[in-house]
Image: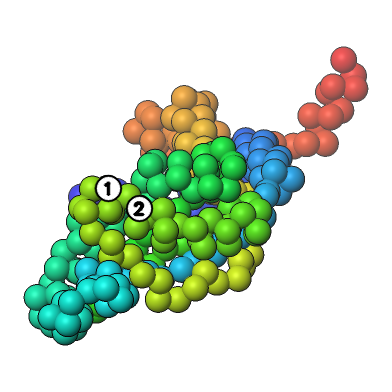
Amino acid sequence: MEKSINLREYVDMFKRRKLIVIFTMIVCLSLGAYKTYKNYISYVPTYSSSITVRINTSKKTKNDKTSSKKDEQVDQYSTYNIAQNQSIATSYKSLASSTNVTNIIASTLKLSPSDIGSVSVSQREELAEFIDISVVNTNAEIAKRVAEILPEAFNEELIRLVGSDCVEVVYEASEPTLIGRSNDTTLLRYAVIGLVISIFLVLLRECLDTKIVTPDDVNKYWNYQLIGTVPLDKESFKGKKRNK
């Protein structure tokens, strides 16, 4: 028959080793508080500006006044045209955040590529020819200027690779918005780490401790039945110490 787990024994165990738990938690919480403070003072506000473009291979035909009447009758919403637009958008959307596009923008704004910030690109599921581009930068003005220039740089790169002038702006660059600061859970993580470490140390200390502390330890280690106990007379014990 398996021996049942007595939760009271574990509670008593942690009471006896409470100094280990307290010391471990103090150390971990102190480290967590320090790390939280470092994160707080090193926080830099960032801004985001987004723009939406559409891949439209009939853009040049539609805007070119010298095109023939036959070309002007090209339906940009035809099944073939839409499929072609979606194919280009799916295959080349990553160009919007490529190094070449970043270099074009940096050259236009007379900035270094590292000052451009981060660019993220996402393709809409329901309208695959539409691409949403978001620019994140620590400078609100630069974030918007990069978003405004990005479609032109993206289009220039597509012309070079695909030979198609097909990027048109659907929604202009939005005003920069401050990105909210996420909740810092550093202190909570360190508290959990401290709890786990303290439990491990207490259990390790108990495993290494072979002293006989309770009457149950007699039966546990020696398999002897306890007959009785002799109470300690504290007053007599103190008197003996004084006589010595």
On screen, residue 240 versus residue 106, left or right, reads right
Residue 128 vertical position relative to residue 133 in the rendered view, above or below: below
**For residue 178, which quarter of the picture?**
bottom right
Please, which residue is most extreme toward the top here? 244
**For residue 56, which quarter of the picture?**
bottom left
Please, which residue is most extreme toward the left here? 80
Residue 174 vertical position relative to residue 30 in the rendered view, above or below: below
Residue at image coords 63%, 39%: 28
On screen, residue 179 versus residue 163, left or right, reads right
Q: Return the residue nearer the eye: 186 or 20.
A: 186
Marks 2 and 1: CB-CB under 8 Å?
Answer: yes
Task: Report, in whole angstroms, how far the alpha carbon at label 2 lies from the one at label 1.
Answer: 6 Å
- Give the amino acid type for the residue marked by disc 2 in the picture: Glu
Residue indicated by mark 1: 160
Residue at image coords 27%, 53%: 159
Q: Let me know if residue 168 appears in the view.
A: yes
Residue indicated by mark 2: 156
On screen, residue 49 versus residue 129, left or right, reads right
Q: Return the residue nearer the eye: 9 or 49.
A: 49
**For residue 20, which quarter of the picture?**
top right
Residue 164 vertical position relative to residue 198 in the rendered view, above or below: below
Q: Which mark is residue 213?
A: none
Which color scheme does this rendered protein use? rainbow
Q: Residue 197's spot in the image, x, y percent?
A: 52, 38
If the image is split into quadrants, where does the C terminus sit? Answer: top right
Q: Secondary structure at mark 1?
A: helix
Residue at image coords 59%, 41%: 111
Residue neighbourhood size for the residue with mark 1, other residues' Cα within 10 Å, grouped as few (<14), some (14–19), many (≥20)? few
Residue neighbourhood size for the residue with mark 2, other residues' Cα within 10 Å, grouped as few (<14), some (14–19), many (≥20)? many
